[in-house]
Every structure is written in structure tokens, then in C-alpha cells.
Image (tube, rainbow, N blue to C red):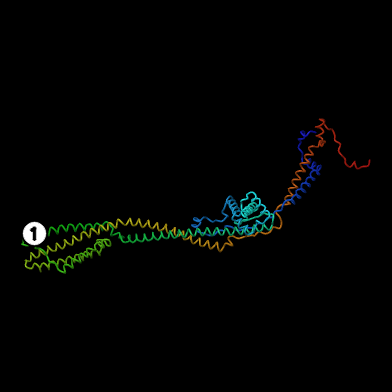
Amino acid sequence: MNLSKIDKQLDIRELIGMAWKRKWLIVLPLILVSAIAFGSSYLITPEYESATIIQIDAEVSLTRELEAIVGEQSGLRRMGTSERREKLQAIHNEITSRAYTVLLNDRLRLERVPQIAAEARKIIAGRPAMPVDQAQIRAVQSMLKESVVVDWAAGDQIMIRVETTDPLMARDIANTLGEIYIGEKVKQELYQIRSSQDFSDIQLEKYEQQLRDVLAERTNVEKEYLAIQLDESITSESNRQEITAEIDRSTREIENLREEEKQILARLNAAGLSSSKVELEGSDTKAGLEQDLKQQLRQVGDLMIRYTWSDPQVINFKLKQNNLISSLESENRRLVNEQFGSQNQEVKDQLAQLFNIRTSLDYLYSKKPYLQSALDELTTKMNLIPEYEARLAQLDRDVAAKTDLRDRFKRQQESSTISQALVQDMSSSKYRVVEPAKAPLGPFKPDRKQILMMGIMLGLVVGGAVAILVELLDNSFKKVEDVEEALDLPVFGVTPRIDFLKKMPS
């Protein structure tokens, strides 16, 4: 029977029958392969595994401003899957770095381990110029990269696992790496906090000085603003119109009095008194009254920016001025009677009226500039108010901004101080060994159970393949269909095989 003719489908019974018929072809490879696999496991160098679990990056409560400036120090639970993988890789790179290798070698003297010493000699052989200590560190670092595995344990806990051929060395390396890692993390965090605190101190001093300057400027501007601050009634249009009207009245009154003065001088000339002889000698009383009147006029500016023109204070001021003018007119009349006693009464009345007019003119000439100056000052202060208000508003914004920055850096400084104290006081709980590494009781490699199971599976595969191959190469007739196909003739009957007849005596 050719192999090409065997393309029939075998049912379950046929498969079971075939397997039973070829059972030794399956069992023998199964036993042989399993024995070889199990026996070869004793030829593999055993490796031991030890791991330490440590807590990392526990959260410390800081202000939002501190996190924004120094950097967010959130826990690992907030990381995504890719970020956690990157974190593991970063920790592995850090633990197997040269700095960690030097610290680890200083504590455990790993360069004395035969395998590492042999590796160091190989490195020196390839690079003779390399110092021995550097070659030893490179050999230790190479061993660490191959034997150290970093993985998550739970939450914010990581597991540093070390795989070596020496169980005690695996334990010592795992524990020492955990201690070094904790120490370095505390140093890094303290350095970060101190750097942040130094930065905060400099910025805090800077912004406090800026805040003091702005506050001083605002105080000065506010003083100036208060100095020109006026009541709404004083700055009203009606009040300014009254002052302007008073200035206009003074102007018209001056014109009228000058005209009256000319008329009186004309009458006096007609009476035989020339204008050059019409002079009135002064007196102490008159000088005092004139001085008081001038002093009163000097107060016009202050009154205009404190009271309205119709205010009782201003009215009293006017009454005082009128009283002083009346007193001056009385003194003028007395002096005329005294100095021009030889003249008739009509001339003396004309002279008294002339000198009173001149007194009024002197008063009005002095009063008008004071009123105009007061009005100009009032207008100037009114125009300055919006400017000062705008300056004060801007300074208020500057003060608020500087205060906010100062407060932020002050809170940052306080948080840095607190964080530094927390790191120093809580380093044992923040970065701590949750489970120290222990000496393994047995090797984790080779896994003889796993090797045996793999040997059994391989033996079954080999045995099954051999049985199928033998079955396919067997040319004997196994079914009626095989006979009909070979002879191309139908089968009319089949004589069954009766095994027990072979046991009967002949």
C-alpha cells in the first residue's frame, strides 16, 4: 500500500485502538524523554532568588503653589501603565548605575567574588590600560544589570529582586541595594526641598522689597490725593459759578469805584484842592486794620477748597471783611477830620468818601487775584482727582499682585521648611523596608517540576509522532475497505477472529 493512498479520516475509536496497539511506541519515548529532561536538570547550575520590598514616594502634603513651582510630587498611584513601566525602568537604571555600584561594592566587597574577579580580569585583558578598581566596578555593574530585577509589589511599593548562584549574596545585595536606594532618595528629596527653599528665600526677599516700595509709593500718592480731596458740593458747577460771579462783581465794582473816584477828584479840584494835595496820612490803627484785612484775604484759597461760597464759614469770612472795611472807613473819616479840619464839612465829606473809595479799591484789587487763584486751584485739584484715582487704582493692583506673589513664596518657604522637617522626621516611615530580603531555602532555577512536565509533554509528542508514523508505514489490511480497495472486489463475508479457540486443546 502506497503512502499516497492513505488519506482516510480516522474516528475516535480508531485513534484509541491505534494508540493501544502502539502503546509501547508512546510509553517508551515518554519515559525516555522525561528521564532525560529530569536528569539534565541536575546539570544546570542552580540559581537563588532573594527580594526586598520597600515603600517609595509616599505623598507629603504641600501647597498648590509649591507643587506648581517645584514640581508635582504626587504618588505613584496616579501614574498610568506606561508611566509605571517608565518609572520601573528609571529605578532599575538608577539602582544599577555606577554611583550605586560603587556604594554597593564598598559595603559588600563584591570584587572578591570569584565570578566577578574573573570578569574583571577579562575586562583588563581586553583593555590593559584600565585601572583594576575601574575594571572591578564595571564587572560588578555588569553583574547587577543581569541579576537585578525591579518590579511592583503593591501600590507604591517596589520589589528589588536579585538572582545569583549564591543564596547569601542574593540576600545581601537585595538588602544593601534597598538601603542605598532609601538613603539616596532621602538625600535627593532634601536637596530638592533645600533648593526650593533657597529659591523661595531669594524670591521672597525680592518681592517683599518690591511690595514695600509699592506700599510706600501708594502711601505718598494717597496723601497727595487726600490733600486735594474735595467735597462734591465744593466741586459742583454751581459753586464755581458763584465764585466766578463774585470775581465778575468785583471787576464791575472796581470800574464803578474808579468812576466815582474821578468824579470826586473833579469836585475837589473845583473846590481848590488839587489831586496832588489830596493825601491822607496813616495811623497805627489804620495800618493794623489793613494788615488784618490782608491776612483775611490770604485765607480765601483755603476757604474755597473747604467750603462752598454760600457756606456759613465763608459768609462769616465776608462779614469779618466787611467789618474791617467799615472800621477802615471810620478811621478814614476820623483822619480826614483830623488832617483837614480847616475845610468845610462838604469838602471833608468828599475827602472821606474819596479815601473810602480808595480803601475799597485796594481791597478789591487784592481780593480779585485771591479769588481767581482760589478758583484756579480748585479747578486744578478737580482735574487732578481722576489722575490720582487712576494712579491709586493702578497701585492697588500692583499691591495686590505683589502681595499675592509675596504670600505665595512665603507659603512656599513655610511648606519647604515643613517638608524638610517631615522628610527628616518621617524618612523612616516614608521610605522604609516593608519586607527585608531573606536567604532563599532553595534555588528557583532550575524548576524540576516544570522541566519534568515539559519532558512529559515532549515525550508524549515524540511517542505520538512515532506511533502515527509507524501506523502510516504499516501496509497490512486493517479494515474491509482496505481489502476492497486493494482487490477492487467486493467482500461477501468476514470470518471473525475467535481468540479463545486458540486456547482449546486440538
Q: Give the crowd class for mark 1: few <14, some 14-19, many >=20 residues within 10 Å.
A: some
Q: Amino acid at mark 1?
A: Ala
Residue 474: image quadrant is top right
Q: Is residue 82 visible?
A: yes
Element class at badge 1: helix
Residue at (5%, 62%) from the top-left corner?
A: 272
Left or right: residue 149 versus residue 462 is left
Quarter holding the N terminus?
top right
Q: Position of residue 370 (x, y in %)?
A: 22, 60
Closer to us: 190 or 124: 124
Give whichever of 261, 212 is nearer the camera.
Answer: 212
Give percent across and percent down for residue 10: 77, 38
Reply above or below: 393 against 34: below
Q: Nearer the viewer, residue 333 or 189?
A: 189
User: Which residue is denoted by mark 1 in the rendering?
Assistant: 266
Q: Residue furthest top?
A: 488
Query: Residue 158: x, y in percent?
Result: 61, 56
Point out residue 311 in the picture as x, y percentages from the top left corner. Answer: 25, 63
